[in-house]
Amino acid sequence: MKSSPNLPQKVKIVEVGPRDGLQNEKEFVPIEIKVELINRLSHAGFPNIEAASFVSPKWIPQMAGSSEVMAAIARKPGTIYSVLTPNMKGYEGALTAKADEIVIFSAASEAFAQKNINCSITESVERFIPVAKAAKQDGIRIRGSISCSFGCPYQGSVTPAEVVEVAKRMMDLGCDEIDIADTIGVGTPGQVASVFESLFTIAPKTQFSGHFHDTYGQSLANIYAALQTGVSIFHSSIAGLGGCPYAKGATGNVATEDVLYMLKGLGIETGIDFDATVKIGDYITKATGKTNASRVGRAIAAKIQ
């Protein structure tokens, strides 16, 4: 089945479950389970896996042991293993861990920046100047993430112009890719199209990715709207794991299984084994004692049983 001529022929999925998904768990997930999860995702063909975070465990307890995780995983050639790096200390950890990509972050909302990283947007970007410079010198890929690009729990509405301004700052740092994140899941398709079309006035479509949460059940519709604008990189989390510890009311990321099912129906290639992904979702939900948030995963499990 061929995809619509108005949609991308191929999409890159960035699997964020091992980091963004598990960071919000109340109980610490054992390192061996994290390693097994990443290895299964690698084997299923995910081209980019957000594997760990070098944020202080004091702030994100679930990310303790990231060095051990990175040392233990079985790396698949050609797969990008990303880690979150908040500062130079975090970057040094990422470098030692042989990360393929570092993720730096800010927000499109001043209020969220203050709550999340205790500084202004400008200050948050300036903090990453030495990190980005070091990464460029070491030949490590840089991904920038912009939180609250479609709405903020403290500020309320966020304009496309505010998102564009932060994206420009990320580009000045040398980011190879920029995530446009709906951190609290309040975006709608029309808004998504407006934000991305505004971003395309400052950089190519290939430089941006969509990161959607499903708080209001809009994530798949928002992904489709982004596809229609030409976006071809999306983030998702296995079994819908995740949320945001600094955003009250934010529910999980869009479930990877649901995204793959939709893309498969649209005839869009991903290079990922769908059946294996469904089994991985079953594995991690059982391992963490959670209910699978993927509608597709639950439906397939019900058929099997």
Image: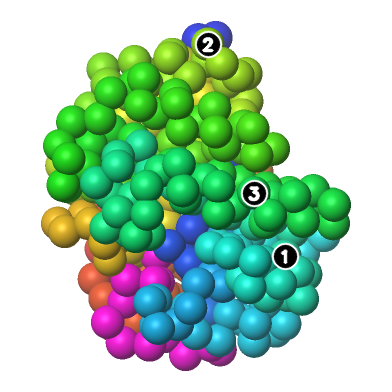
Q: Would you say 171 lies left or right of 155 here?
A: right
Disc 3: which residue: 129
Front residue of 98 and 75: 98
In this rendering, does residue 247 appear at all?
Answer: yes
Numbered circle sitting on residue 44? none
Residue type for callout 2: Thr
Q: Of marks 2 and 3, which one's residue comes earlier in the chain? A: 3
Q: Quadrant of the C terminus?
A: bottom left
Front residue of 130 and 5: 130
Marks 2, 1: nearer the viewer: 2
Range of magenta residues: 21-33
Q: Position of residue 244 (x, y in %)?
A: 30, 60
Q: Would you say 116 lies left or right of 20 here?
A: left
Check if residue 22 falls in the magenta segment: yes
**Disc 3 + disc 1, Cβ < 8 Å:** no
Residue type for callout 1: Ala
Q: Residue at image x 25%, y 30%?
A: 158
Q: Would you say 126 lies left or right of 246 here?
A: right
Work out how far the residue at label 3 is from the one at label 1, CA to CA, in angstroms: 19 Å
Q: Secondary structure at mark 3?
A: helix
Disc 1: which residue: 99
Disc 2: which residue: 201
How dense is the environment of label 2, judged by Cα within 10 Å: few (below 14), some, or many (20 and up)?
A: few
Check if residue 139 falls in the magenta segment: no
